[in-house]
Amino acid sequence: MSSFDIIEQKMRRAGIAGAAIDAFRHSVQVLQSGAQMMIPESEIQPAEGVMDWEEAVSGTAPADADLLRQMVVIKLNGGLGTSMGLQKAKSLLQIKPGITFLDTIIRQVRSLRQAAACPVRLLLMNSFSTSADTLAHLQRYADEGFGKAEQVEMMQNRVPKLLADTLAPAEWPAAPELEWCPPGHGDLYAALVGSGRLEELLAAGVKYAFISNSDNLGAQPDTRFLRCFAESGAPFVMEVTRRTEADRKGGHLATRRTDGQLLLRETAQCLPEDAEAFRDIEKHRYFNTNNLWLRLDALKDYLDEHGGVMPLPVIRNEKTVDPRDASSPRVYQLETAMGAAIQCFPGARAVCVPRSRFFPVKTCSDLLLLRSDAVEIDESGCMQLAPECGGVAPVVLLDTKLYKQVDSLESLGVPGLKHCHRLVVRGPHRFTPGEPLQGEVEIG
């Protein structure tokens, strides 16, 4: 019995779909082969031919009802937000009074449905950790067709952690759940196939997918760009934006020297000697927002030609099987990135979008800004900065020792930030709700 046969048996016993097993087999084979898993600076050059969003959508008519009927909105919804002290789906975090990320996503899809006069589809790629909470929250929208798993859910897979010395699947009887890890959002492609959703969507005439993270409210389905995407014939378009000083660690877009193909290089794929070049935001100017446009028919054709597997670059993370026990066995966690598929599709393109389309919430500083009057969300789920901001979001920097978890914001309060350029809070403080701040404000 081969080493992967043991892995496969474990995955099948856990009910993992064949498509996910095949994808993991590819990742393990890459690891076993000793192939270069890094992307050296010598093999790439700065990305070229990146479209400009404003030029693309300027003067473009919104997609008509026929085109909207061919679109699905897919949100990656597998995160718990544990770094912010959450123990439930991050998309259930309240961003405005009585409004969560998930409510806003529903508003966006509802608006598309009204425009198309048909049920534009929504798919949530949930994890085992977020499924129950998410579906319970969606019961309030049951009469709109969002309440049942078969209507909206596609489950993220899980894969075994591998022992670093033998590559056998880790065993940890004290806590068997620690034997598994998420395979990264590159699992999207295996999940679409293994769940039957890809065939289902194509059979229903749906061939354009807009994909983004559920915690990025800037990632709104844009019907003008849907038309641009459909008319371009491109199989895959990645939304990128210009890197800033804050984005030196994020994955960036590049061009492969050998054939001019666009690719994505993540931090974990950078050689130590290339670190300075990786951080050079003037050389590598664009980073991935994880907002993607995908032709589902092109995806099916590609998978049919490649044995049902998207051969994505593999990212190897070395950890211990129990993250809280440094003496527990060393393991490898193999991940893939959804955006890395840009290198698989000839004709794939990138479009540079304004920063307003990349508005993720990773920290309490991000959440405070979103909860303030500097950010407005209308009934259609459209998020935009208040006019007083002049198109530039205020910078919010909270003391991470005091304001790391969501509950800590209750004691801080939410000030008015639409006239504020920069807010720094270095110690305990209490704002009067809506207290207007102006210009540069430092406290503590």
Image: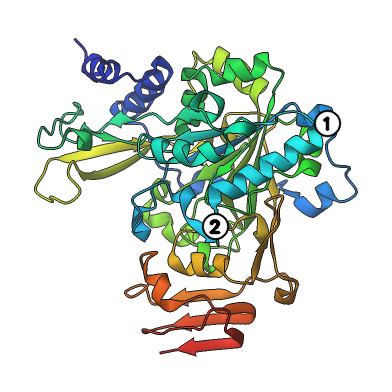
Q: Is mark 1 on a helix, strand or loop?
A: helix
Q: How crowded is mark 2: few (under 14 residues within 10 Å), some or many (20 or more)?
A: few
Circle on res. 51: none
Percent coordinates x, y for residue 384 in the rendering: 69, 61
In the structure shown, which secondary structural element does the residue marked by tag 2 occupy? loop
Relative to 19, is 4 on the left or the right? left
Q: Can residue 142 be seen in this view?
A: yes
Query: Does residue 256 show up?
Result: no
Label 1 or label 2, whichever lies nearer to me, is: 2
- Could you tell me the amino acid type at mark 1? Ala
If you read the primary sequence from the N terminus, does the residue marked by circle 1 or circle 2 appear first? Answer: 1
User: Identity of the amino acid at label 2?
Assistant: Gly
Question: Disc 1 marks which residue?
Answer: 65
The residue lying furthest to the top in this view is: 1
The location of residue 263, given as percent across then percent down, is 56, 40
Foreground of the two, 293 or 310 = 293
Residue underneath mark 2:
98
Q: What residue is at 17 percent from the left and 44 percent from the top?
A: 322
10 Å crowding of disc 1: few (<14), some (14-19), many (20+): some
